[in-house]
C-alpha cells in the first residue's frame, strides 16, 4: 500500500456528527478524510425544513444545512470521499479500511455512521417522506399544530412519539398491528390516559394517500387493513409518524467494537472512546436517546478532540 493511502484520521459518516468532527479535526491540522457514503449528509438530507437547529431563527432546509457543514469543514482542509466503507480491520495498527475502490489506513478512526429509522417499506411512504411522513416527532411535531396525525407502532418509541405529539396535534391516533401494546407499562398507562390519544387495533398501513398540487405534496389520509377481518378503510390524517424504532448502522463493526443488544456502539463515560484505543464513536450511532442534529454535532466535536488527544499521545 502506498503512503498516499495513509491518514492520521479517517471519519466514517457525513451527518452532523461526522462533519462537525471533520471541522474540528481539520482546524487541529489533522487533515481528516470523510467517507460520505451513498447518502452524504445523513438523515438530514431527507428532511425538508429544520427549525430547531440553533442559529437559524427562520429555519433552514436539511440538505442546505448539511452543505454548510461540509463547506465549513472543507474550508479548513477536510476532504470528502464519496465511497462506502465496505470492510474494516480495527485489530491491526494502523487501522485498515476498504471501499469498493481502494484501501486506506489510519492512526485514528471516528465512527459516525448514524442510525436509520425503521420504516414500513411502502412506496408512498418514501414519496411523502418530509411532506407529512416522518420518523421523528421531536423534529417535525411542531408542523402539525392543531392537526390530526397517526403514529404507527406499539412499542416505547411509538408511545413516546405519540405523547410528544399531543403537545401540538389536536388528535393522535396510534395504529398497531396487534390488540395489545408492546410498550413498557408506564408508557402504556401514560398514552392510555392522554385524552388526545386514540387507538386503532389489529391494523396495518397499506398505503399513504396524499395530493400533489403545483409541486406541493401533502398527506391527506391512510388506507388501513384490519388483520382480523381483512377489511380496508381510509382514515383521514394530516401526518403519519412511523414509530417502530431505529437501527444503528453498525453492522460493519460487529465483533470488533462493543455494542448493546440493539447495536448501538458503547462509549466510555464522559467521552467518545470505544473499547479500542484510537477508535471513537459520535452521533446517532452511539445515541439511542436524543437522536438530534445538535446533539450529534456536539459529540462530533467531542470525538475530534478525543482523537486529537489520542494522536498527540
Image (cartoon, rainbow, N blue to C red):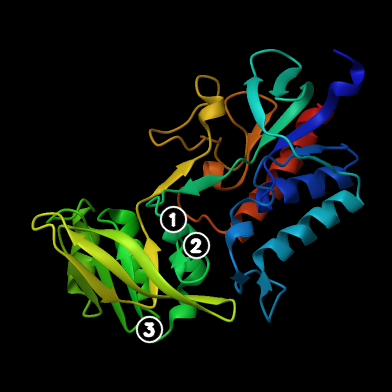
Quarter occupied by the N terminus: top right
Circle 2/circle 1 CB separation < 8 Å: yes
Residue 13 occupies which quadrant of the picture?
top right
Q: Is residue 245 left or right of residue 142?
A: left
Label 1 crowd bin: few (<14), some (14–19), many (20+), radius 10 Å: few
Circle 3/circle 2 CB separation < 8 Å: no
Residue at (43% x, 84% y) in the render: 145
Residue at (85% x, 22% y) in the render: 5
Secondary element type, mark 1: helix
Q: Residue furthest bottom?
A: 146
Which numbered dot is residue 123? Answer: 1
Quarter occupied by the C terminus: top right
Which comes sooner in the sequence, label 3 or label 2? Answer: 2
Distance Cα–Cα, label 3 vs label 2 = 21 Å
What residue sits right under mark 2 in the picture? 127
Residue 199: % across, % down: 19, 68
Q: Nearer the viewer, mark 3 or mark 2?
A: 2
Residue 97, placed above or below residue 261 = above
Residue 55: % across, % down: 72, 73
Residue at (62% x, 39% y) in the render: 272
Which numbered dot is residue 147? Answer: 3
Amino acid at each position: 500500500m502506498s503512503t498516499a493511502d495513509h491518514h492520521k484520521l479517517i471519519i466514517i459518516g457525513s451527518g452532523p456528527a461526522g462533519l462537525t468532527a471533520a471541522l474540528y479535526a481539520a482546524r487541529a491540522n489533522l487533515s481528516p478524510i470523510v467517507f460520505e457514503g451513498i447518502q452524504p449528509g445523513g438523515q438530514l438530507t431527507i428532511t425538508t425544513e429544520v427549525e430547531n437547529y440553533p442559529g437559524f431563527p427562520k429555519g433552514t432546509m436539511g440538505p442546505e444545512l448539511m452543505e454548510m457543514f461540509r463547506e465549513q469543514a472543507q474550508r479548513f482542509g477536510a476532504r470528502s470521499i464519496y465511497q462506502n466503507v465496505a470492510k474494516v480491520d480495527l485489530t491491526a495498527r494502523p487501522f485498515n479500511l476498504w471501499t469498493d475502490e481502494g484501501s486506506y489506513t489510519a492512526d485514528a478512526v471516528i465512527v459516525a455512521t448514524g442510525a436509520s429509522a425503521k420504516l414500513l417499506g411502502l412506496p408512498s411512504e418514501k414519496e411523502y417522506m418530509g411532506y407529512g411522513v416522518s420518523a421523528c416527532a421531536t423534529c417535525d411535531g411542531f408542523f402539525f399544530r392543531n392537526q390530526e396525525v397517526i403514529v404507527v407502532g406499539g412499542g416505547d418509541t411509538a408511545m413516546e412519539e405519540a405523547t410528544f405529539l399531543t403537545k401540538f396535534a389536536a388528535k393522535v391516533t396510534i395504529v398497531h398491528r396487534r390488540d395489545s401494546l408492546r410498550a413498557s407499562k408506564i408508557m402504556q398507562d401514560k398514552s392510555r390516559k392522554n385524552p388526545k390519544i386514540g387507538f386503532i387495533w389489529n391494523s396495518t398501513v397499506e398505503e399513504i394517500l396524499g395530493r400533489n398540487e403545483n409541486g406541493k405534496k401533502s398527506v391527506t389520509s391512510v388506507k388501513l387493513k384490519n388483520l382480523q377481518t381483512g377489511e380496508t378503510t381510509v382514515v383521514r390524517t394530516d401526518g403519519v409518524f412511523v414509530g417502530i424504532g431505529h437501527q444503528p448502522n453498525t453492522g460493519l463493526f460487529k465483533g470488533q467494537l462493543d455494542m448493546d443488544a440493539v447495536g448501538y456502539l458503547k462509549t466510555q463515560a464522559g467521552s467518545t472512546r470505544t473499547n479500542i484505543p484510537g477508535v471513537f464513536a459520535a452521533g446517532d450511532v452511539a445515541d439511542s436517546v436524543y437522536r438530534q442534529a445538535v446533539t450529534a454535532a456536539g459529540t462530533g466535536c467531542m470525538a475530534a478532540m478525543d482523537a486529537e488527544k489520542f494522536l498527540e499521545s
